[in-house]
Each structure stands twice: as structure tokens, then as C-alpha cells.
Image (cartoon, helix red, strand yellow):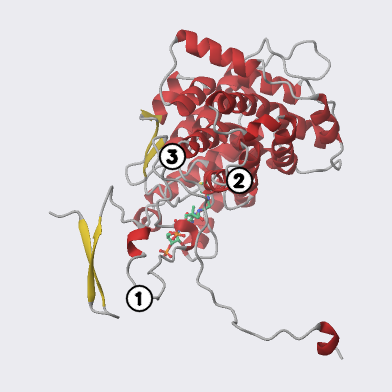
Amino acid sequence: MTDSLTVRDNRTGQEYDVPITDGTIKAADLGKIKSGEDAPGLAVYDPGFVNTASCRSSVTYIDGDEGILEYRGYPIEQLAEKSNFLEVAYLLIHGSLPDKAQYDAWVHEITYHTFVHENVKTFMQGFRYDAHPMGMLMASVGALSTFYPDARNISDADNRHMQIVRMIAKMPTLGAWSFRHAQGKPYVYPDNDLGYTANFLSMLFKMSESKYDADERLVKALDVLFILHADHEQNASTNAVRSVGSTQVDPYSAVSAGVGALFGPLHGGANEAVLRMLRRIGSKENIPAFIEGVKNGNERLMGFGHRVYKNYDPRARIIKKAATDVFEVTGTNPLLDIALELEKIALEDEYFVKRKLYPNVDFYSGLIYEAFQFPPEMFTVLFAIGRTPGWLAQWLELTQDKEQKIARPKQIYTGDRGLTFTPASERWA
Ligand code: ACO
């Protein structure tokens, strides 16, 4: 078997041998195929990059047919059960698990960079009283580049490390303050005696008590949710980080582009839609009629189906378990019964089976977030905090990848050509 593709260009009758490497062909090789000496080379038209590999990456592996998700080779199930978010962040950034000294140093560094410059607080306070927390997060992450102008020096390894630590450390502070802002509550400073996730809960919910003592089961559940969201290879927001990062801008600017991409309802917003759907269904008795509506094409079963997973999304299984743990503390959410029944009926129904539609990460996550008393606008902020190490691991990989270039796709031009311009004074006369 030869690892190549023979292409015959019927415009010219010429044949080309295009090498196949890692299951891909190079778009540049297709560019050598021309209809004439001066004609442009053949290009690939792929809106949404549905079938285009943009990079080589050793961060995250997904097998959508088998429902496998691995970070640096470790199955997500094992990491969610036996690790914690900061250790997973270390793994994603460094590529291997830390020894004890490395872990302690990493946790220490992250913990002691949770504070932000007081001026960050001042400008965050300047947002409108009802500002969306994702807008505040996007703006404040981007603004960090003005507080750390040295971050532009992305060719220096120590410098890159410093910005990575800062960003992972400060994201919960910025996220929590965005939440407090809309509630008209004072911003709470980080408590460095607490672990990463417990400190985040403290900054979110602490009032006059001297120490905020979150229930350990809630801390664990939120930590697991952060782990599950930590990376998902070349998704829309990671692609945004890489695309902006390819200009060699500082990582704060690149990550703020990722936050912007995540803000979109097609990316980070589906869990909110699941809650709305469950509320609309209202009770278990209404499920069969709802399912009929889905099958007739009048409805969409939100939280089901995935572009990559054609099997149970492994994250959904773990979240389902975390939901049970959270409800032990907070009391159950009546919508859970509807969700469980909906899942049961859908998984047995021919329509969903045939199309390989299974619950995705968003089917249960909204229920948990609601149990924490987060308003829906905060769901995506939580996603962004979890995804930050993934964005940074991918950015780091990008900065060291010699094959990478500034991201600059081609277009198929469909407009006019060669028109003659008439000045406004003549056109409007
Ligand atoms: N409910 C009902 N039918 C569905 C659903 C669904 N949730 N998802 C897909 N289908 C059907 C489609 O109608 C289509 O049927 P057809 O072949 O008869 O036309 C078939 O399944 C294939 O679906 P596509 O839309 O082609 O799949 P695609 O990969 O483009 O879409 C997506 C994936 C957008 C996630 C889709 O499944 C969906 O809209 N799901 C609901 C929204 C959701 O939960 N999004 C969160 C995704 S996870 C994340 O972003 C973190």
C-alpha cells in the first residue's frame, strides 16, 4: 500500500501524487495543482473547518465513535475521579504529571497570583450595573495585557510560564467579581488559605463571615466540572486562541478572544437551553409528546448530540454522577427527574439510536450550576475558568510549533471587479 493520493486534474489531464501523512494531505500540495502556468493553485473550501486539521497537537485525544476523551493520554474518567483541577492544569501545560515538589511549587505559584492589581477592580466597578459577566470577563482578561506589558515577550520560556500562572490564578478572581458585580455585592478578595476551587466559592458567596467554609462535596463537584471542561482539542474557542495567538500577540489578548468565542450560544450556551427545555416540558407526563415533537422536527432535544461524539459523551456520564453528589447537599432539583426520564426514553427510541444521539456535557451541567444558585449568565464563566489551562496549553504548543504560521485562510471571492469610482459629489448631483 502506498501512502499517497493520485489526483487526475481533468482540466489538464495531468496526474499528481499527493503524499498522505497521518491520515491527511497537505493543502499546500493541492496548491501545486494548476489549470495553467499562471493560474492559482487548487485550494480547499471548508467553511467551519469541518474537515481541516489546523495543527499537530499532543494535548487532548478524542475518539468520538468510542466516546473516549484523554488529556495527555490519561482517560478523563480517571482524572475526574482521582486528580484535582490544578494537577490536571499542570498536566495539560507541562505534558506530564508533577512529582510532589513540582506539584507543591505549582499550587503555591497559582495560589499567590490570585490577587489582581487594584486598578483592575476599579475598572471592573465601572461596568454597567447589569453587565453580562462574560463581557466583563472577556474585557478584564484582555486588560491584563496592559498590566503585564512584558507578556509580549512570548519567545522567553520563563516569561510564558509567568503569564500562564497568572492567568490560571486570576481567572476565578475575575469570574467571581463579574458575578458579584451584577448582584451589587462587594467584591471579595482571594483567600490564600483555601484551595483553588474553595477559594473561588468563597469569592462568589462570602458575605460578612470571616471565613467562607464551602461544603467539601460542593467543592469536589465544581472541581470535577472544571476538570471536565479543561480542554477539548480544536473547538471553536481554542481555535480562536490559536488564531489570535498566531499573530504572536500576548497570551492575555489571545485568551480574551477565546472567552469571546465561548460566549456564543453555539459554543458555551447549550446548558442554559437544556434548563429552559426541561422547564417547558414541566413534568414527566409531557415527555412522550415532547419526544414526538422532536421526531417530527418541531423541537430539538437540547443537550443531546455532538459534532464529534457519536456515543455517550464521557463527560456527561461523570457529570450525571456529580449531579447526584451535589443534590445530596442542596436538595434535589425537580428538573432532574424529568432529565433522567427524558434520557431513558430517548436512548431507547429508534430516532435517537439511528442518529447516534446521546447526552452531551451540557445535558446535566446546567442542573448542577442551578443547584449552586448560579444564574444562567454565569454558566459560561464557569466553563471559561475550567477551559483556561486548555487554552494556554494549546497556546504554548502553538508558540513552539515551527510548522505554524499566522492563521490567514483563503477566500472564494464573489464580488464585483474593476468598477470605476465616481466621487460622491457627482453621484449625488
Ligand atoms: N435533537 C434532535 N435531533 C437532532 C439533535 C437533537 N439534539 N441533534 C442532531 N439531531 C439530528 C439532526 O436533525 C439530523 O437528523 P437528520 O439526519 O434526519 O437530518 C441528525 O441528527 C444529525 O445532526 P446534525 O445537525 O447534522 O449534527 P451536527 O454534528 O451538525 O450537530 C449539534 C451537532 C449542533 C451538537 C446538534 O446535535 C445539536 O444541535 N444538539 C443540541 C444542542 C446541544 O446540545 N449543543 C451542545 C453541544 S456540546 C458543546 O458545545 C459543549
**Badge number at residue 220:** none
Using the numbered discs, state the Cα–Cα distance from disc 3 to disc 1 in whole angstroms.
33 Å
| Residue at image mark 3 | 401
Provide residue 428's location: percent of width, then percent of height: 85, 88
Which secondary structure, mark 1? Answer: loop
Q: Earlier in the sequence, mark 2 or mark 1?
A: 1
Which secondary structure, mark 2? Answer: helix
Q: Is residue 304 above or below residue 76?
A: below
Crowd tier of the residue under label 3, counting other residues whose Cα lies within 10 Å: few below 14, some 14–19, many 20 or above? few
Q: Earlier in the sequence, mark 3 or mark 1?
A: 1
Using the numbered discs, state the Cα–Cα distance from disc 2 to disc 3 in whole angstroms.
25 Å
The kind of residue on which mark 2 rests is Leu
Q: Nearer the viewer, residue 21 or 97?
A: 21
The kind of residue on which mark 1 rests is Glu
| Residue at image mark 2 | 262
Disc 2 vs disc 3: Cβ atoms closer than 8 Å? no
Between tags 2 and 3, which lies in front? 3
Q: Quadrant of the N terminus?
A: bottom left
Provide residue 187's location: percent of width, then percent of height: 81, 25
Residue located at (57% from left, 42% from top): 248
Between tags 2 and 1, which lies in front? 1
Provide residue 141's location: percent of width, then percent of height: 69, 36
> Taking the image as drawn, is residue 282 in sight?
no
Furthest-left residue in view? 1
Crowd tier of the residue under label 2, counting other residues whose Cα lies within 10 Å: few below 14, some 14–19, many 20 or above? many
Quadrant of the rendered image containing residue 313: top left
User: In the shown orientation, is residue 146 left or right of residue 123?
Assistant: left
Residue located at (56% from left, 53% from top): 286
| Residue at image mark 1 | 37
Q: Earlier in the sequence, mark 2 or mark 3?
A: 2
Disc 3 vs disc 1: Cβ atoms closer than 8 Å? no
